[in-house]
Image (tube, coloured by chain):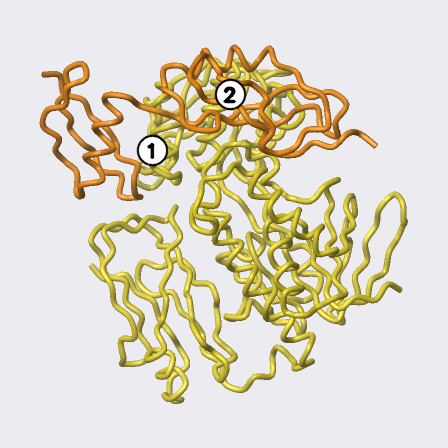
Amino acid sequence: MLKVDLAVIGGGPAGLAAALEARKNGIENILIIEREKELGGILQQCIHNGFGLHYFGEELTGPEYAERFVEQVKKEGIAYKTSTMVLDIRPDRTITAVNSTDGLIKISAACIILAMGCRERTRGTLNIPGDRPAGIFTAGTAQRFVNMEGYMPGKKVVILGSGDIGLIMARRLTLEGAEVKMVCELLPYSGGLTRNIVQCLEDYNIPLRLSHTVVKIHGKDRLKGVTVAKVDSNRQPIKGTEEYVECDTLLLSVGLIPENELSRGAGIQIDPVTSGPVVDERMATSVEGIFACGNVVHVHDLVDNVTMESITAGRNAAKYILSCKDTRSVGRSIKTVPGHGVRYIVPQRISDLENIEELKLFFRTNDVYRNALVVVHFGQKTLYSAKRQKLAPGEMETVKLKSEALAELVCDTSCDELKVDIEL
Amino acid sequence: MEERIITCIVCPMGCRLNVEAENDKIGNISGNRCSRGKTYAAEECTAPKRMLTTTVRVSGGIHPFLPVKTERAIPKGLIRQCMEEIRSVQVSAPVKAGDIIVKNICGTGVDIIATRSIPCQN
């Protein structure tokens, strides 16, 4: 059995930043386990720019952002195994993994950081009726084909879902010679960044059909076309608005799901809204000595935020390894509660009240709000209140609580719920 | 003067700006909530620029394709032409991030550079 102080599951941006931060905090024996043949994660196929504006203060492409961390990991001599798949994690922190050179590997880790990221929702989760021809891809799969393998998925393309990957692929496929006929979005607003709508769709005259969806798939061996229709306010297709669009390719950009099969296997409590582990402000999960960070916890819009969150996880994992203090037995804990207009909050609980220096709450709203107040309530008290010109589900919001507010959390022991509300 | 509608991308607000423009002359700009929007809209109407990111073939490397980008933003109107020129380029591994792949693409004075390293196979 291989023994390590820290095992990091996943060598994408979250795993790399967490491992580096743990090393910086004195942890020597670290192992990163990655299922791809190289480190870097999904960033390697995101060849467009726009990464790193917050963390590095400059605009980088995905591979450039990844390479900065990969180089540091190599310089620090942090061990990693690529082309290695973790099959199972036990609550006692034994890991079973497999690869073609070592065969079956058993690892005993003093501490584990989960950084497996997320995966795309597929056609199966949408229940679009029709045949099952070739030519239907998730946007990320198409991105990998085009940017890394050098294959074009098709010539005439319809994209369902206006998330950022879908928008980016609309531009990319257009530049590579495909005709992108339209992007359909079920909701009355796009989930993508404004910048991508302008630079990926408007620049190339690609229509964005809001409140539209694909209701039928045509074609037996290869996709021949799709029927799109307008939807009503309950997201139901409106009869008589159907329109046939000829295409050989349908890309789905309809959301991402944190990949938590391993976490569930380890008995970690999962938040049904985020589909990720319930974490506290240290990124500790409900199982002792197991931390989590990045898209495996909740889907982020910006990799910069993944990096910051993973640094928190790495630092606290190091603290745990060096102190051996159970991450769960920390006395009183406070729950964060999504109030009016809020879909979820991360962290879901605050547990290490004695040692808390600053507290950032990340949340998403459930609708678009303009000129609204973000208010944090603790019992009868208001700990934070600030106006935001625009709040949208596609953009993660942050609230930073100052030390006076944190002092209230520590002092007022009669209350154990911190609530975030959107007030109009 | 002709009126154009520009969506501002400086911040997530996404203001819709009305810009009066004739050739290179900018008239009245309205709909912006801050001054940065005015600057953006004026540039968007007179000399819009974009970064271009794409890939080139690489032989003998661990991957068959190398991601590249324009070192700086280039005039928006030249993007298709640049894609054509880049399409014919092939390089050999090893490549280092930052290596110049095409010098002075389409006479823009901007180089195409590699955005990752590709070591040789084995």
**B35, above or below B115, in the image:** below
Sequence order check: which comes first, mark 2 or mark 1?
2
- Check residue A211 in the rendering and tell me which mark sits there, or answer none: 1
| Residue at 42%, 66% in the rendered image | A360
Q: Residue A320's image quarter? A: bottom right
Q: Tags 2 and 1 in contact by the CB under 8 Å rule?
A: no
Residues at marks 2 and 1, CA–CA distance in whole angstroms: 23 Å
User: In the visual, does A412 lie left or right of A333?
Assistant: left
Q: Chain of mark 1?
A: A
Q: Identify the colour of chain B in the image.
A: orange
Q: Identify the colour of chain A in the image.
A: yellow
**Residue type, numbered disc 2:** Leu
**A184, above or below B23, in the image:** below
Q: Residue A276's image quarter? A: bottom right
Label 2 crowd (10 A; few <14 / some 14-19 / many >=20): many
| Residue A388 point in image, percent of width and height | 25, 55
| Residue A46 point in image, percent of width and height | 55, 35
Q: Chain of mark 2?
A: A
**Viewer-proximal residue among B98 and A396:** B98
**Viewer-proximal residue among A184 and A231:** A184
**Viewer-proximal residue among A309 and A96:** A309
- Check residue A173 in the rendering and tell me which mark sits there, or answer none: 2
| Residue at 81%, 54% in the rendered image | A97
